[in-house]
Amino acid sequence: MKSQVIGAAVLWIATSVALAQSVVQPTGNTPRFPKAYKDLEKQTKPPSNNWLLDADDDIERFRRLQVIAGGTDIPMWEIAHRYEELYVAIQNNNWEMGVYHWEKLQDRLNTAGMKRPARTQNIEGMFLDSGVWKSMHDALTSRDAGRMRTQFQVVRQACIACHIAEKVGFLNDSSVFKRTESLPR
Ligand code: HEC
């Protein structure tokens, strides 16, 4: 009797673990790797939601992280968002919010350069070390609304100029530049 109870308990635990590990598929579709990523086929374990931990080794895990971290495009989403929040901050005379986004934007430009080192020259030369970044920072900490407004237009032009220099000038039609074209006084 006792062994039956233990047996049932073991079975219950084993089933629970198996269920927890198996992916619940509401669609009933079989999990599989995308055809575009041939390297994933080498994985010993079957495809599951444990896309990182189920990789065969750490080299493969790092490789997958590098793939999802992207290049310049993903940081640019964040940069565009923070640039637009800076625009909002200036309109509201909220210089602290402006400084917050401006400093994070600097971090993100640097990590973009880490990922795409051929862009570092323009990131630093046209933006971070050219005076564009510092002048905006100084304008914010001066709390001078007029200075902030003037400097914002310089920033906008520097973004646009770097896209041209990096041969992606077509991106200057992005809606964010239209929305930030002028700063009402
Ligand atoms: C190195 C110079 C450089 C600077 C400075 C720069 N960008 Fe970019 N930006 C790029 C490059 C290169 C791409 C294209 C990335 C790619 O091809 O993956 C890009 C892409 C973008 C995109 C499109 C992202 C997407 O894929 O959806 C936006 C929006 C953008 N940048 C906004 C800005 C804004 C706003 C600023 C200024 C605050 C700025 N960028 C400053 C180089 C720059």
Image: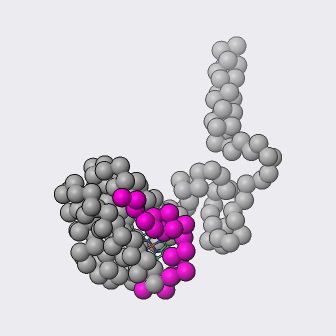
Horizontal and vertical percent position of residue 26: 76, 42
Relative image position of residue 137 (x, y in whole percent): 24, 62
Most extreme residue toward the front is 185
Q: Is residue 145 left or right of 114 when viewed as pictured? A: left
From the viewer's perspective, tell me whether residue 54 is left or right of residue 41. left
Q: Nearer the viewer, residue 121 or 185?
A: 185
Check the image and name the residue furthest to the top: 1
Residue 183: in magenta span: yes
Nearest to the observer: residue 43 or residue 139: 139
Where, by quadrant of the figure, is residue 33 drawn? bottom right
- Residue 160 visible? The answer is yes
Residue 146 is covered by the magenta coloring: no
Query: In which quadrant of the rendered view does residue 120 lie?
Result: bottom left
Numbered circles on residues, count? 0
**Residue 137, visible in the rendered structure:** no
- Colour convention of the picture: one colour
Quadrant location of the N terminus in the rendered image: top right
Residue displayed at 79% across by 51% down: 29
The C terminus sits in image quarter = bottom left
Q: Please name the residue shown 70% across and 65% down the image.
A: 34
Residue 141 in which image quadrant = bottom left
Position of residue 10 relative to residue 101, above or below, is above
Q: Residue at x 72, y 59 (%)?
A: 32
| Closest to the observer, 25 or 57 | 25
Where residue 91 appears, as percent x and y from the top left, is: 37, 53
Q: Residue at x 63, y 29 (%)?
A: 13
Q: Is residue 110 above or below residue 101?
A: below
Give how far across and how far down residue 131 sits, in percent: 23, 75
Magenta-drawn segment: 165-185
Q: Vertical placement of 84 versus 23: above or below? A: below
Viewer-proximal residue among 44 and 84: 84
